[in-house]
């Protein structure tokens, strides 16, 4: 599985018209989880289509794995790319930074977008600019 499977997976997923949200590999690389999205939302058929195509490509490329799972990122979708932080402006998010800001590493607030390479977040303490490169983890907070 040590082929550059990330870009191979991204090529297949985007080639089918979907967005690659995330790829997770089990420690030994035996289980491969691929999270896809599309503006209209992901269906079971979408997952099957991507799974079938990836299986064929992995066969051709001799990618070694035991199990492949393809799914939607869920309502608490992770935000990975700068474009995610622009796209989901106006949504509630929670994020964690690697470098504490005011003795704090975890933040919850309304995403305002991106400004000068920083993610803009409105928290109960006001507007904050958090450098994109310092963000360890971020995800949407679903509203019910």
Image: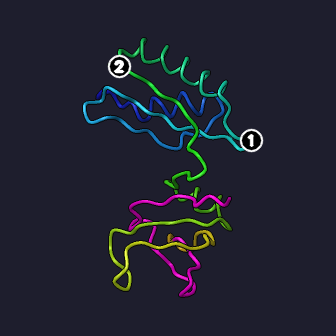
Which residue appears at 52% of the width and 58% of the height?
139
Q: Position of residue 26 (x, y in %)?
A: 32, 34
Quadrant of residue 63 within the rendered picture: top left
Question: Answer yes or no: do the residues labelled 2 and 1 have beta carbons within 8 Å?
Answer: no
Position of 134 relative to 102 (above/below): above
Quadrant of residue 16 within the rendered picture: top right
Mark 2 element type = loop
- CA gap between label 2 and label 1 equals 31 Å
Q: Position of residue 125 (x, y in %)?
A: 53, 87
Position of 13 relative to 51 (above/below): below
Residue lying furthest left in this view?
28
Which residue appears at 58% of the width and 45% of the height?
74
Which residue appears at 55% of the width and 44% of the height?
73
Left-right relation of 4 to 113: left
Position of 15 relative to 87 (above/below): above
Q: Which residue is mark 1?
A: 40
Left-right relation of 47 to 118: right
Q: Position of residue 105 (x, y in %)?
A: 37, 74
Q: Which mark is residue 66?
A: 2
* Front-most of residues 92 and 87: 92
| Image quarter hosting the C terminus | bottom right
User: Which secondary structure type mostly characterizes the magenta part of the structure?
Assistant: strand
Q: Which mark is residue 51?
A: none
Dot 1 alpha-carbon crowd within 10 angstroms: few under 14, some 14 to 19, many 20 or more = few
- Is residue 142 covered in magenta? yes
Residue range in magenta is 119-144
């Amino acid at each position: 599985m040590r082929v550059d499977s990330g870009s191979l997976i991204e090529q297949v997923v985007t080639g089918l018209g979907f967005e690659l949200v995330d790829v997770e590999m089990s420690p030994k690389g035996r289980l491969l989880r691929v999270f896809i999205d599309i503006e209209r939302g992901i269906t079971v058929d979408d997952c099957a289509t991507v799974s079938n195509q990836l299986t064929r490509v992995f066969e051709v490329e001799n990618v070694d794995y035991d199990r492949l799972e393809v799914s939607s990122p869920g309502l608490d979708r992770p935000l990975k790319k700068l474009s995610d932080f622009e796209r989901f402006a106006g949504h509630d998010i929670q994020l964690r930074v690697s470098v504490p800001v005011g003795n704090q590493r975890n933040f919850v607030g309304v995403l305002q977008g991106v400004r000068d390479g920083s993610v803009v977040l409105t928290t109960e303490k006001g507007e904050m600019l958090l450098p994109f490169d310092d963000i360890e983890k971020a995800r949407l907070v679903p509203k019910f």
